């Protein structure tokens, strides 16, 4: 667990997700704008099912790692989530995803989550990360540009898959 200060001065606690975070994840999802939901899930997802919620909070800490950011003044309020899932076909590669509530975007939280996720991935022997995102998602493209390492991109219509080799 780590407390950090965002660019705005807001303090958040970044910690591993827990199974009891289900209701907090659902509340955070409900607070996402339709555009942010679409950018994160690549579809217009109106709500999380119970199975979705269970999948998001029940991680093993090795092949599926997830971190949440909560407000230090309101630890029940999740304002960002980042995760990676090791690919079953390639133990050295993981897919990652990050979502930050709209009112906390462009404040350094996505970068903080990404840094901690890539550190955790390296610690678990992961050498490459992939992300599938909309071509029209400038904030995530800026976020990914901050990672050093070799990058490859493949575009499939409005969707792009980016693979990054993690710097040692």
Image (cartoon, rainbow, N blue to C red):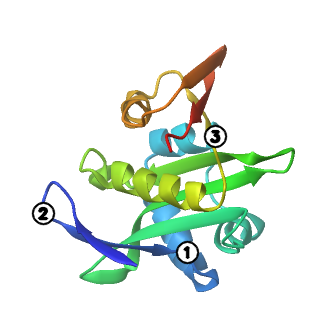
Would residue 123 be found to the left or right of residue 75 on screen? right
Residue 66, relative to residue 75: is it above or below? Answer: above
Residue 22, relative to residue 29: is it above or below? Answer: below
Q: Which mark is residue 128?
A: 3
- Cα–Cα gap, marks 1 and 3: 22 Å
Q: Which mark is residue 9?
A: 2
Nearest to N terminus: mark 1 or mark 3: 1
Residue 11's quadrant in the figure? bottom left
Q: Which residue, as the protein is rendered here, is positioned at the far front?
A: 168
Residue 134, relative to residue 49: is it above or below? Answer: above
Q: Position of residue 59 (x, y in %)?
A: 69, 71
Nearest to N terminus: mark 3 or mark 2: 2
Q: Badges 3 and 2: C-beta atoms under 8 Å apart?
A: no
Badge 1: few (under 14), some or many (20 or more) residues near its Cα, within 10 Å? many
Would residue 49 be found to the left or right of residue 11 on screen? right
Q: Residue at x 64, y 16 (%)?
A: 155
Q: Nearer the viewer, mark 1 or mark 3?
A: 3
Badge 2: few (under 14), some or many (20 or more) residues near its Cα, within 10 Å? few
Residue 8, relative to residue 15: is it above or below? Answer: above
Q: Position of residue 132 (x, y in %)?
A: 63, 34
Q: Residue at x 65, y 38 (%)?
A: 43
Residue 57's quadrant in the figure? bottom right
In the picture of the structure, the residue carrying the numbered disc 1 is 17
Residue 101's quadrant in the figure? bottom left
Q: Nearer the viewer, mark 3 or mark 2?
A: 3
């Amino acid at each position: 667990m780590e407390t950090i200060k965002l660019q705005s001065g807001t303090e958040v606690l970044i910690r591993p997700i827990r199974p009891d975070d289900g209701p907090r994840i659902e509340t955070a999802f409900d607070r996402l704008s339709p555009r942010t939901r679409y950018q994160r899930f690549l579809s217009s997802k109106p709500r999380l099912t119970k199975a979705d919620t269970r999948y998001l909070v029940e991680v093993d800490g090795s092949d599926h790692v997830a971190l949440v950011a909560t407000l230090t003044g309101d630890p029940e309020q999740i304002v960002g989530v980042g995760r990676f899932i090791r690919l079953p076909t390639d133990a050295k590669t993981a897919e990652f995803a990050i979502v930050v509530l709209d009112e906390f975007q462009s404040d350094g939280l996505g970068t903080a989550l990404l840094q901690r996720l890539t550190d955790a991935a390296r610690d678990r022997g992961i050498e490459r990360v992939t992300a599938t995102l909309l071509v029209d998602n400038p904030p995530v493209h800026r976020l990914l540009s901050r990672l050093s390492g070799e990058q490859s991109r493949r575009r499939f219509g409005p969707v792009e898959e980016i693979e990054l080799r993690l710097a040692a």
